[in-house]
Image (tube, helix red, strand yellow):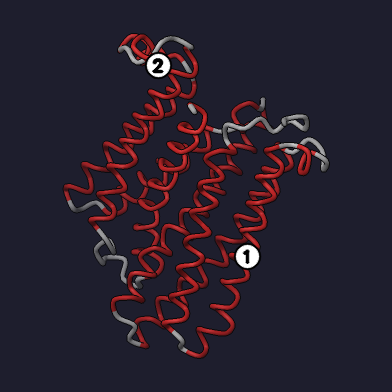
Amino acid sequence: MLTALIAATRAVHFAAAILLFGQFVYAAAVSGDRRAPLPSPRLAGVAVVLLLASALAWLALEALAMSGLPAAQALSLDTLGIVATQTLFGQVLSARLVLAGLLALVLLHGRARLAAGILAALVLATVALSGHAVADKGVDRVVHVCADALHLLAAGAWLGALVPLIAMLGRAAEAPLARQATQRFSTLGLACMAALLLSGIVNAYYIVAEPAALVHSLYGRMLLAKVAIFLLILTLAAVNRLVLMPRLAWRRLRELALAECLLGFTVIAIVGKLGITIPGPHHP
């Protein structure tokens, strides 16, 4: 039960960070006007609240898991303080809370878009320090963490920006606006998919001990499910780019984009569990 709660909390935390980062990516790379306001300030605000709330919940759940103490003791300020300041997990999460707090202040101020975007990118990239990559040593650790960070930022740029794109297509599908936005997003998506593929290969190199582990371990089977969903997303994206965009079929394009979005967040749910699953070949 505790493991399931941690996995769900991780997924919510990742999704919030992705949605937040995607707001800035959409404004800068898809809308066409870098001075334009965020596509959905309300969604950005909700994402910040979810990010902060899920971080605190994650800290509490990890305190329960790490300490093995009864809930009253594990959730005491003393125990929470030890987990927050004396473990790598807690230190990284605390740093992310500080970054998210600064980002919230910048968003409330309503200016300094570049600073807010950088903070959102840092919030998402530091999630790479909450997974299996930190178990490596030396150069391997640096390469693995950087690959994970690239994976997260690429996912955030694609999936996070896809949400406001879908909203735009639903509000007003005027041909010029829809064409420009979808063309820019399609180009962005190609770059993100390439980065996801490259960083995913690097991550698999470090995590998957042997090919048999893909079938005989829980981690491997979940990884295969993630790859299968990724391939399905690529197929839908290809249909959008090669078939629907030339035909200006905005309604159908929006429907497939919604399907891509749902599949993307399904992957996030899987990632929430992957990060706390032993990748060894003999895991039941």
Residue 76 x %, y %: 32, 12
Question: Residue 96 is drawn in which quadrant?
Answer: top left
Please, is residue 179 above or below residue 281 in the view? below
| Residue 219 marker | none
Which residue is pictured at 46% across the width and 53% down the height?
156
Name the side, left or right, on which 277 lies relative to 31: right
Residue 166 x %, y %: 38, 70
Q: Nearer the viewer, residue 71 or 27?
A: 71
Indicate the amino acid at tag 1.
Leu
Q: Which residue is tagged 2? A: 85
Quadrant into which the C terminus falls: top right
Marks 2/1 in contact by CB < 8 Å: the verdict is no
Please, is residue 94 above or below residue 223 in the view? above
Name the side, left or right, on which 222 lies relative to 265: right
Residue 238 x %, y %: 60, 75
Which residue is pictured at 48% across the width and 12% down the height?
68
Q: Crowdedness of circle 2 by 10 Å Cα count: few (<14), some, many (20+)?
A: some
Mark 2 → mark 1, Cα distance in angstroms: 42 Å
Local secondary structure at mark 2: helix
Viewer-side label of 2, 1: 1
Q: Crowdedness of circle 1 by 10 Å Cα count: few (<14), some, many (20+)?
A: some
> Which callout, 2 or 1, points at the residue further toward the start of the chain?
2
Question: Residue 132 is drawn in which quadrant?
Answer: top right
Indicate the amino acid at tag 2.
Thr
Local secondary structure at mark 1: helix
Please, is residue 274 above or below residue 183 in the view? above
Residue 241 x %, y %: 55, 78
| Residue 232 marker | 1
Q: Nearer the viewer, residue 125 or 69?
A: 69
Please, is residue 267 above or below residue 129 in the view? below
Which residue is pictured at 31% across the width and 71% down the height?
33
